[in-house]
Amino acid sequence: MENPNTIGEIKEHIATNLEHIIEEAQLMRNSIDEKDYCLLCEIARIKDRFNAIQSSASFFYLKAYISSFTKKTIEIAKALQNLSDNRHGGLIIIERSAPVEEYIQEGVQINADCSSQLIESIFYPGNPLHDGALLIKGDYIVSAANVLPLTTQSFGSKKVGTRHRAAIGLSEQTDALILVVSEETGRMSFALDGTLYPISSSETRIH
């Protein structure tokens, strides 16, 4: 099942991967003393399954978290995927119940209908607005080039970029959901309640 979208499909996807993890863990336990057995390979495979579970569930909950606040979920998903494919960095605030203006340094007013084309053009490298965060309220892009508060969380030796720190920082102070695309890797994620969640590229593709 490549693209689970309903709660039933998500549960089935998780259950299937958990069953595989249990089987592979048992194989590891039974084969650990074998001379030619690659323990690291099996650990990597299990890690990949956990990542698949987290990514699929993350996109399902992402849609659940924002669908009540915007009708532009598909447009946002298209933009997110295209930014990822092209490795164009992006930072997008989806305002939910609480206004975010008092927590951000406002940038440039846009006040336009939300579309994937507009989002992508704003984050195109060289565009004067591409470095800041885009603010979406309802079905409209309100502003761009907004500056967000950075989290004070410590990530130890893990490298966490400025966009990701900004996304986490705003999510610690508001109920907004903040989407991030890394320009270095193209990886997508979203921040909510001070935590960053990965999104699989296969989940955001529109067929």
Image: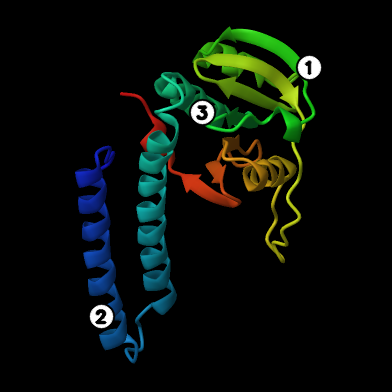
CA–CA distance in space, label 1 to label 2:
54 Å
Report the residue that reaches farthest toward the front: 98
The image shows residue 53, relative to residue 60, as above or below, that is below
Q: Is residue 4 left or right of residue 96?
A: left
- Mark 1 or mark 2, which has the lower sequence index? 2
Residue 45 x %, y %: 37, 64
Q: Quadrant of the N terminus?
A: top left
Label 1 Cα crowd, 10 Å radius (few <14 / some 14-19 / many 20+): few
Question: Upstream in the sequence, badge 1 or badge 3?
Answer: 3
Which secondary structure lies at badge 3?
helix
Please indicate, yes or no, whether residue 118 appears anywhere in the rendered image.
yes
Q: Amino acid at mark 1?
A: Pro
> Is residue 18 positioned above or below 4 on the image?
below
Instruction: Specify whether 2 is left or right of 110.
Output: left
Q: Which mark is residue 80?
A: 3
Where residue 100 appears, as percent x and y from the top left, is 66, 31
Q: CA distance from mark 2 to mark 3?
A: 38 Å
**Residue sitting nearer the eye, 207 or 36:** 207
Dot 2 lies on which element? Answer: helix
Report the front residue among 78 and 142.
Answer: 142
The numbered dot on residue 26 is 2
Instruction: Kindly check if marks 2 and 3 are in contact, taking CB atoms under 8 A apart as contact.
Output: no
Reply above or below: 102 against 141. below
Quadrant position of the C terminus in the picture: top left
Residue placed under numbered mark 1 in the picture: 128
The image's colouring method is rainbow
- At horizontal 40% and vertical 53% (from top left) the residue drawn is 54
Task: Decide if residue 127 is in sight here.
Answer: no
**Amino acid at dot 2:** Gln
